[in-house]
Image (cartoon, rainbow, N blue to C red):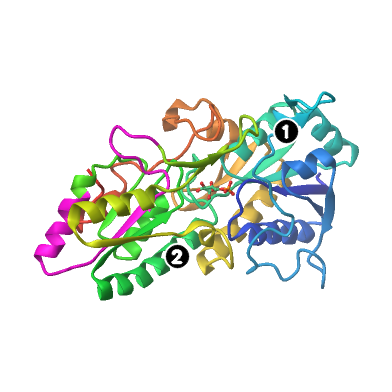
Amino acid sequence: MIKKVAILANGGDVSGFNAVIRAIVKTAENNGVECYGFIDGYNGLLKNDYEKLSTANDEPASGILAKGGSIIGSSTNANVFNYKVVNENGEIEYKDLSDVCIENIKKDGFDCLFTLGGDGTLKSARDFSTKGVNVIGVPKTIDNDVACTEITFGYNTAVSVAAEALDRLHTTGETHHRIMVLEVMGRYAGWIALESAIAGGADIALIPEIPFDINKAVEKINSRIAKGKRFSVVVVAEGAVPKGGQLTIQNTRNNGSGVDNTKLGGIGQIVAKQLEELTGLEARNTTLGYMQRGGTPTAFDRVLSTKYGAKAMELALQGKFGVLAVIKNGKLDSVSLEDVVGNNTKIGAVSGNTAESNLRKVTMDDDLVKTARNIGICLGD
Ligand code: F6P
């Protein structure tokens, strides 16, 4: 019997964090379980900083379904298994502080910890589970690249924002006979770029999974010019790389392994410049950035987040720990965290934020790739 549970939201925020939190709290309340939220992700767990979550009037988890961000914060720099600390000599050291977290969980009697996050967050969740903590993960990221699930919460909102941006770039591009480039997020996976390209009627989509040849994009633009279309719309994932080239990195930080230390960005500008030089049309780049993560979730994400939150609490009530709530064949399900972030050859492990983590990348037989190719969207190959 579980009586007291805690939630933490970790990693880059997404629209839908609060909808998941609300669904966990509501399902908990309906089953007589008390719910708490650690503040600022794993940092809150380390500092034992938490608050009670309730959906009673004016309480923190009330009225948050459509609210962007996370009412309990989030952290993009907290790997408590390799935590950055400054020692007495002023030097930076990385320490495994996970036992402090486990002590906090035990001391205050939390029967289950819900971790809302992407591959880095879920790897820590798996490691806590291995150390005996009752953990249940919920797959979050706008990049949609968490292994073992068909969709993560936050992704649909990001795609909708990108599609709307493309609609707007379309009209200004057409008016001024320009190439309009939109750089979207997607470090290792091109889901946002690909799906928004289809939704927003783009002509070219460059994704991390297909190293691009700029000349292929030029050919596409020239073929449009030949048809009298003196403008083109291009979507570029931040993680897109030219054939034989490198990721475009804006800056790096040193928060240790297990967190994103490189900030990507700039490939859109590079592509725009090259296309301008090679086609003779003017080109402009727009970097969509954090617009994709902030603000109210779409109806789809509200429902998905609610399904995930309710399922996560259901799993806790059933005593199924060490798992991630997932969507499999379109239905709610769960898989072991080990399958998600462990050395899982079944899903073809590729390296993500952590050396061990698995990511779900766009595959060449995906319907989105086939659809894009069928309608003539150039994928840079
Ligand atoms: O992982 C999600 C993501 O949105 C990436 O696409 C992006 O590179 C990253 O977060 C940026 O996060 P931040 O700047 O908050 O560290």
**Disc 1 residue type?**
Val
**Disc 2 residue type?**
Ser
**Is 115 part of what is drawn in magenta?**
no
Q: Quadrant of the C terminus?
A: top left
Relative image position of residue 117 (x, y in whole percent): 61, 45
Q: Quadrant of the N terminus?
A: top right
Inspect this view and state whether residue 335 appears: yes
Per the rendering, the mark at residue 70 is none
Relative image position of residue 113 (x, y in whole percent): 74, 43
Relative image position of residue 241 (x, y in whole percent): 35, 40
Q: Which residue is mark 2?
A: 160
Relative image position of residue 216 (x, y in whole percent): 19, 47
Q: Residue 350's image quarter?
A: top left
Q: Of residues 11 and 119, which is closer to you in this image?
A: 11
Q: Which residue is mark 1?
A: 80
Q: Of residues 276 and 345, which is closer to you in this image?
A: 276
Is residue 263 shown left or right of residue 122?
left
Is residue 159 shown left or right of residue 3?
left
Query: Relative to residue 127, is residue 142 depicted above or below?
Result: below
Magenta extent:
217-246
Q: Secondary structure at mark 1?
A: loop
